[in-house]
Image (cartoon, grey):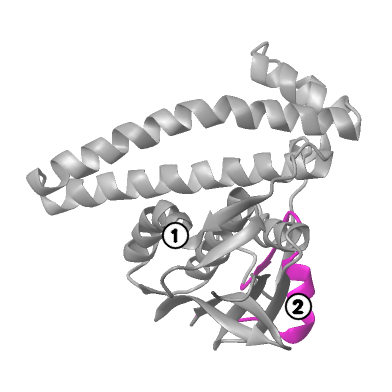
Amino acid sequence: MHAVIARVMVRAPGGESVRSCKSDAPASALITKFVSDSGAERFQIISNLAHELRSPLHVLNGYLEILVEDWTTELSEEPGQMLARMRQSASELTQTVENLLEYISADAGTQAAVQETVDLAEVIEAIKPALTASARRKKIFLVWSIEPGLKLTQSDRRRVASIVSNLVSNAIKFTKRGGVTVRLRRIRVRQQWVVELAVTDTGIGMERERIEDAFEPFVQLCSSNSREHRGLGLGLSLVRRNVNALGARLEVRSRPKLGSRFIVHFAQAPPQ
């Protein structure tokens, strides 16, 4: 996430036109159309591709889930680890596709406004298994501290889940040693009751002047040019969009080599 800014762009290898490709495959024609079309048409192509990936990825994840649950204890250590890595990679790719679809939908203004009561315990239970598996694979800790009975009124479950999931997965991604702590609690801030989400990691951190860059779409701040950390760089951009859409408040505290803390305050009615 730091030091070097990597922007994602699409171009033909060596600067040549993609039209020079000899393949008649549909993928080649689609890439050619992508390069030549206008911005709006490009977004539609990306959206179509993401939707085409979504269904087979969900099927793949389902079968891998069954294999991991039913066969891991029957396999020796090495095949078991290979199966776990396959499951984790499929999960990460699925999250990338979901983030891309969410970004395109928000950019096109097609996300419907939702006003509902959100049970935060239910949100956490839904996203917790995949995030726990990701942390376990990296051999770092992931600690959840959730105050019971927390609910948000006039909110949007999908946006809240996206905020929590992207903040935690981002923290896991950029943490090599130590781990990540997630805390949800009700507090008073400036005479107003809020639900505070705090995601704290012991990762690589970032300099103050780099924080704003981290929220730009399709941008990753990396420790080197090697693109050690996979992803499109959409997670934090989606976090900021969803925070703004919910009328919440986002704060970031970070120091290089010491880690980061992302804090979100969701407005809430006073406790009964």
Name the residue: 61% across, 73% down: 223
Name the residue: 63% across, 86% down: 188
Q: Residues within 10 Å of mark 1 (few under 14, many from 20)?
A: some
- Residue 185, relative to residue 86: is it above or below? below
**Residue on which the image places disc 1:** 124
Tell me if label 1 and label 2 are in contact, CB under 8 Å.
no
User: In the displayed image of the protein, which residue is found farthest to the front?
Assistant: 272
Disc 2 element: helix
Can residue 33 be seen from the camera position used here?
Answer: yes
| x then y, percent, for residue 77 | 14, 53
Task: Please name whichever residue, 215 or 240, is drawn nearer the observer in this view of the structure.
Answer: 240
Which image quadrant for residue 20? top right
Name the residue: 72% across, 32% down: 46
Q: Residues within 10 Å of mark 2 (few under 14, many from 20)?
A: some
Callout in the foreground (1, 2): 1
Disc 1 element: helix
The magenta segment is: 203-223
Q: Is 64 on the left or on the right of 196, as rendered?
A: left
Task: Please name whichever residue, 272 or 260, is drawn nearer the observer in this view of the structure.
Answer: 272
Q: Is 215 on the left or on the right of 256, as rendered?
A: right
Under mark 1, the amino acid is Ile
Under mark 2, the amino acid is Arg
User: In the displayed image of the protein, which residue is found farthest to the right?
Assistant: 38
| x then y, percent, for residue 44 | 78, 28
Q: Reading the chain from its start, which is encountered first: label 1 or label 2?
A: 1
- Residue 28, relative to residue 271: is it above or below? above
| x then y, percent, for residue 65 | 29, 40
**Residue on which the image places disc 2:** 210
The image quadrant where one finds the C terminus is bottom right
Give yes or no for residue 194 being in the magenta stretch: no
Name the residue: 58% across, 51% down: 157
| x then y, percent, for residue 261 | 59, 81
